[in-house]
Image (cartoon, rainbow, N blue to C red):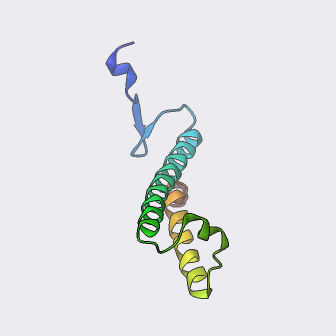
């Protein structure tokens, strides 16, 4: 196999196409988006837990007993909606494209 064959063979709708079925490419894009979100969240959480423990603010175990207030619940819902929009972007773009055909 040559180096050229190791690369994505073509682009479909402005996105790399890895599979014969475009649905699989969309699923892969969503999975990769989720993976990016998870990696960033884990790194930020790790940093916060280490800093808090180093400064004697709280231990990671305290998270298990935390109950968010209304303000925190609203902020979490907003962030959840934003994450969903980013993850589902590939499907949203497809719906828009289909409506304009």
**Residue at coordinates 52% horizontally, 72% vertically from top-left?**
58
Outermost residue on the left side: it is 3
Between 78 and 7, the one lying in front of the other is: 78
Image side of residue 14 versus residue 58, left or right: left
Image-quadrant location for residue 10 = top left
**Residue at coordinates 46% horizontally, 72% vertically from top-left?**
56
Between 8 and 51, the one lying in front of the other is: 51
Image-quadrant location for residue 84 = bottom right
Q: How many marks?
A: 0
**Residue at coordinates 37% horizontally, 27% vertically from top-left?**
7
Give percent across and percent down for residue 85: 52, 65
Between 17 and 58, the one lying in front of the other is: 58
Give percent across and percent down for residue 83: 52, 64
Between 89 and 35, the one lying in front of the other is: 35
Image side of residue 66 versus residue 10, left or right: right
Give the quadrant of the N terminus. top left
Give the answer, above or below, for where 90 lies relative to 57: above
Give percent across and percent down for residue 24: 58, 39
Image side of residue 56 versus residue 69, left or right: left
Give percent across and percent down for residue 39: 47, 52
Outermost residue on the top side: it is 1
**Residue at coordinates 55% horizontally, 47% vertically from top-left?**
31
Give the answer, above or below, for where 19 lies relative to 60: above
């Amino acid at each position: 196999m040559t180096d050229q064959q190791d690369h994505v063979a073509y682009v479909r709708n402005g996105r790399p196409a890895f599979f014969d079925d475009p649905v699989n490419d969309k699923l892969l894009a969503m999975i990769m988006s989720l993976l990016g979100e998870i990696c960033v969240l884990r790194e930020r959480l790790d940093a916060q837990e280490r800093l808090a423990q180093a400064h004697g603010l709280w231990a990671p175990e305290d998270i298990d007993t935390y109950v968010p207030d209304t303000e925190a619940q609203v902020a979490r819902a907003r962030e959840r909606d934003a994450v969903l929009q980013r993850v589902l972007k590939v499907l949203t773009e497809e719906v828009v494209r289909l409506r304009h055909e």
